[in-house]
Image (spheres, rainbow, N blue to C red):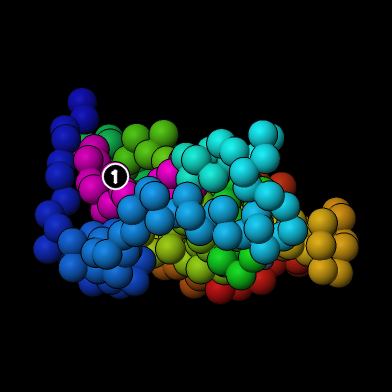
């Protein structure tokens, strides 16, 4: 028996405004350039790279790039609080760890707008409320589909779960490969970055943290705490 429970927006008001761009009154909601302006900007970049945007092969490219931006950065149009709002109570006193691991994501670094490809692992210790497990994966996608740095994305995912579900603890570990360092710059293919954010029971209790890390197959030695 699970009953729907909607968390009020008031309860989640403390989530930083900067984590919720695209909301009314927040940066990103106003003064969005038109599609024509976006296409013109891509034409400029093509010319700046040294090619001719009017040649046959490139003629539709600005339009295609703008369409792909709509998809790659769709995370600005969604509200993470609304996404997690529908929770379930009465979970028969289940208070063990809930873990979703190996959540593949594709994001873009905010420094170069180049892909970050990786996996996220999320664990939490429920306090009466749980959320449908696909929502955790969608939350990862929502934040991945913005211009990101991995440390910030890790913290945003953990903080949102903490704010909305109010669990006894949250753990998020993200492993990412950054194309800005594998295909350009220092050219280090194979290097990956591991970041984590531990809250509540996962931060306080080394045994809980170890249990989570062993369940995701990560010794923890490579992890950068954020
Ligand atoms: Zn970068």
Secondary structure beneath dot 1 equals helix
Q: How many marks?
A: 1
Q: Is residue 220 visible?
A: no
Image quarter in which the C terminus is found: bottom right
Residue behind mark 1: 83
Query: Which residue does the image show at 12% across and 54% down from the upper left?
Result: 8
Which span of residues is magenta-colored?
Answer: 68-89
Q: Residues within 10 Å of mark 1 (few under 14, many from 20)?
A: some
Front residue (pair 203, 11): 11
Residue at far top of view? 1
Image quarter in which the N terminus is found: top left
Q: Is residue 68 left or right of residue 18?
A: right
Front residue (pair 218, 115): 115
Query: Which residue does the image show at 44% across and 54% down from the upper left?
Result: 38
Quadrant of the displayed image that contains ligand 1: bottom right
Q: Position of residue 7 (x, y in %)?
A: 16, 51
Q: Quadrant of residue 62?
A: top right
Asked if residue 108 is positioned above or below residue 71 in the image, the reply reads below
Q: Quadrant of residue 200?
A: bottom left
Q: Is residue 89 left or right of residue 185?
A: left
Q: Is residue 50 left or right of residue 35?
A: right
| Most frequent secondary structure within the magenta stretch | helix
Asked if residue 13 is positioned above or below residue 136 in the image, the reply reads below
Front residue (pair 66, 190): 66
Query: Which residue does the image show at 43% across and 63% down from the upper left?
Result: 156
Q: Is residue 5 visible?
A: yes
Query: Which residue does the image show at 15% across and 41% down from the upper left?
Result: 5
Q: Position of residue 120 (x, y in %)?
A: 58, 49
Q: Position of residue 204 (x, y in %)?
A: 49, 72
Q: Position of residue 11 (x, y in %)?
A: 16, 63
- Is 22 covered by the magenta stretch? no
- Is 86 covered by the magenta stretch? yes
């Amino acid at each position: 028996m699970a009953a729907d429970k909607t968390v009020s927006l008031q309860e989640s008001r403390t989530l930083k405004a900067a984590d919720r761009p695209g909301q009314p009154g927040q940066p990103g909601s106003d003064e969005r350039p038109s599609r024509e302006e976006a296409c013109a900007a891509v034409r400029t970049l093509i010319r700046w790279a040294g090619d001719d945007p009017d040649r046959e092969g490139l003629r539709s490219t600005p339009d295609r790039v703008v369409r792909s931006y709509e998809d790659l950065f769709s995370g600005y149009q969604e509200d993470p609080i609304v996404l997690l709002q529908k929770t379930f109570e009465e979970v028969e006193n289940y208070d063990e760890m809930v873990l979703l691991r190996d959540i593949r994501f594709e994001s873009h670094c905010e420094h170069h707008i180049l892909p970050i490809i990786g996996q996220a692992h999320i664990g939490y210790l429920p306090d009466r409320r749980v959320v449908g497990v696909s929502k955790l994966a969608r939350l990862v996608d929502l934040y991945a589909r913005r211009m990101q740095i991995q440390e910030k994305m890790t913290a945003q995912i953990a903080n949102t779960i903490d704010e909305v579900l109010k669990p006894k603890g949250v753990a998020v570990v993200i492993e990412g490969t950054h194309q800005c360092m594998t295909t350009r710059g220092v050219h280090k293919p194979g290097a990956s970055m591991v970041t984590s954010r531990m809250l509540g029971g996962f931060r306080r209790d080394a045994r809980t943290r170890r249990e989570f890390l062993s369940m995701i197959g990560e010794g923890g030695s490579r992890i950068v705490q954020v």
